[in-house]
Image: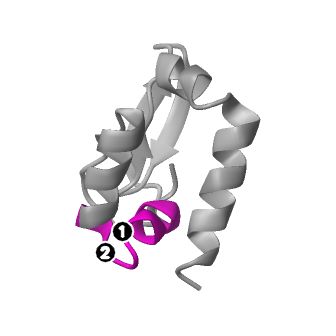
Amino acid sequence: MKASAVRGAGNGNAEKGLQKLKKDHGAKPIRGPGTGTSDSIAASIDGKHPAKLSNKEAYIPPKNVKSAGGAKKLSAKQSNLSSKTK
């Protein structure tokens, strides 16, 4: 989940947002160099596909995405949470 959505889940506070997303969806915090939009943390998807992540984003395991209603529903939630920080 994008850092802006994490902040939105915490009403502007990334740490509170990470705690809420962990409780609600089993989210795991992404920590590393850079900012919430820098894409400076190298990662991979399924060990095959390269990905770039940003500090204070959150990873939600696939089984938790499914139990939250699927990727489309979680993506809509992410968009809603991100709009809270603008």
Q: Is residue 40 above or below residue 80?
A: above
Which three-letter amino acid code belongs to the residue tagged 1? Gly
| Identity, as a three-letter code, of the amino acid under mark 2 | Asn
- Whether residues under marks 2 and 1 lie with C-beta atoms below 8 angstroms apart, the answer is yes
Res 37 visible = no
Q: Is residue 15 above or below residue 39?
A: below
Tell whether position 5 is magenta: yes
Task: Specify the segment rendered in magenta.
Answer: 4-15
x 43%, y 63%: residue: 9
Frontmost residue, 53 versus 56: 56
Give the class, few, some or many, for how many residues have Cα within 10 Å of label 1's Cα (few <14, many ≥20). many
SS label for mark 1: loop
Q: Residue at x 36, y 68 (%)?
A: 10
Query: Quick check: can you spot residue 26?
Result: yes
Query: On the image, numbered disc 1 is attached to which residue?
Result: 10
Say if 86 sits above or below 27 in the image.
below
Dominant secondary-structure state across the stretch colored magenta? helix
Q: Which residue is found at the position 57% from the left and 78% from the top?
A: 84
Query: Crowdedness of circle 2 by 10 Å Cα count: few (<14), some, many (20+)?
Result: some
67 on left or right of 76: left
Query: Percent position (x, y) of residue 83?
Result: 64, 75
Residue designated by label 2 = 13
User: Where does the image place residue 35, in percent across and percent down from the top left?
Assistant: 36, 69
Q: How many marks?
A: 2
Observer-nearest of 23 and 63: 23
Horizontal arrangement in the rendering, residue 62 relative to residue 35 (left or right): right
Label disc, if present, on residue 31 of the rendered structure: none
